[in-house]
Image (cartoon, rainbow, N blue to C red):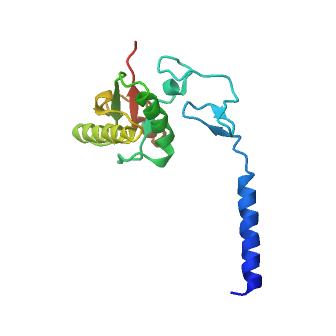
Amino acid sequence: MSKRRIALLSFVSLAFLSACSSTKLDNTSDVTGKAVDAAGVSNVASVVADHLNPNSLISTQRSVYFDFDQFNVKASETAVVERQGKYLASKPNLAIRLEGNADERGGREYNLALGQKRAEAVARALKVYGVSDKQAEPVSFGSEKPKAQGHDEAAWAQNRRVDFAYPAK
């Protein structure tokens, strides 16, 4: 390579790196869903991360959704799993039930098995964030506990899920 080409590549690389270093991260959020600035300081009103607080993301985002006939946690659902996992890891004495569900298609036994696999997949994903086996009990309701009534894809998509069931007290 010529010296001129090397100099040009060095200049372009330096320009790219300096542009990256000046990028502000103003619109990020922490695990509680609160917006934080680049220094990690919240720039919105404080929200208590608590499963008993109905306004907390821990309370409002308690379902992980799945594709048809699948039990792997989708990339689009990892934020919910992460938030719930970090919350549960911070409360080692808190135990929940992971309720696996399926849509109405498929036989009873098949849907129960699929719901169980979904609940177990979420339990495995929670372990990444420090949740112990004794904190999360995977169970299946199959298609017996639909969230949405209906016989179309919109309803079925709402029913293919795992719900985080926290104790009431």
Query: Compared to 11, does 50 lie above or below?
Result: above
**42 horizontally vs 155: left or right:** right
Taking depth in this image into account, of 102 and 59 the one nearest to the observer is: 59
Q: Residue furthest top?
A: 169
Q: Looking at the rendering, in which quadrant would you find the C terminus?
A: top left
Identity of the residue drawn at 69% across and 27% down: 44
Identity of the residue drawn at 47% across and 42% down: 78
Q: Residue furthest left?
A: 109
Q: Position of residue 15 (x, y in %)?
A: 76, 64
Identity of the residue drawn at 39% across and 38% down: 126
Q: Is residue 83 visible?
A: yes
Identity of the residue drawn at 42% across and 47% down: 67
Task: Report how many numbered discs are placed on residues in the image.
Answer: 0
Taking depth in this image into account, of 111 and 43 the one nearest to the observer is: 43
Taking depth in this image into account, of 118 and 137 the one nearest to the observer is: 137
Q: Residue furthest front?
A: 3
**34 horizontally vs 138: left or right:** right
Res 119 → quadrant: top left
Query: Compared to 76, does 86 lie above or below?
Result: above
Q: Looking at the rendering, in which quadrant would you find the N terminus?
A: bottom right
Q: Position of residue 60 (x, y in %)?
A: 52, 26
Q: Position of residue 33 (x, y in %)?
A: 58, 32
**32 horizontally vs 130: left or right:** right
Q: Is residue 155 visible?
A: no
Q: Position of residue 63 (x, y in %)?
A: 44, 33
Res 164 → quadrant: top left
Res 88 → quadrant: top left
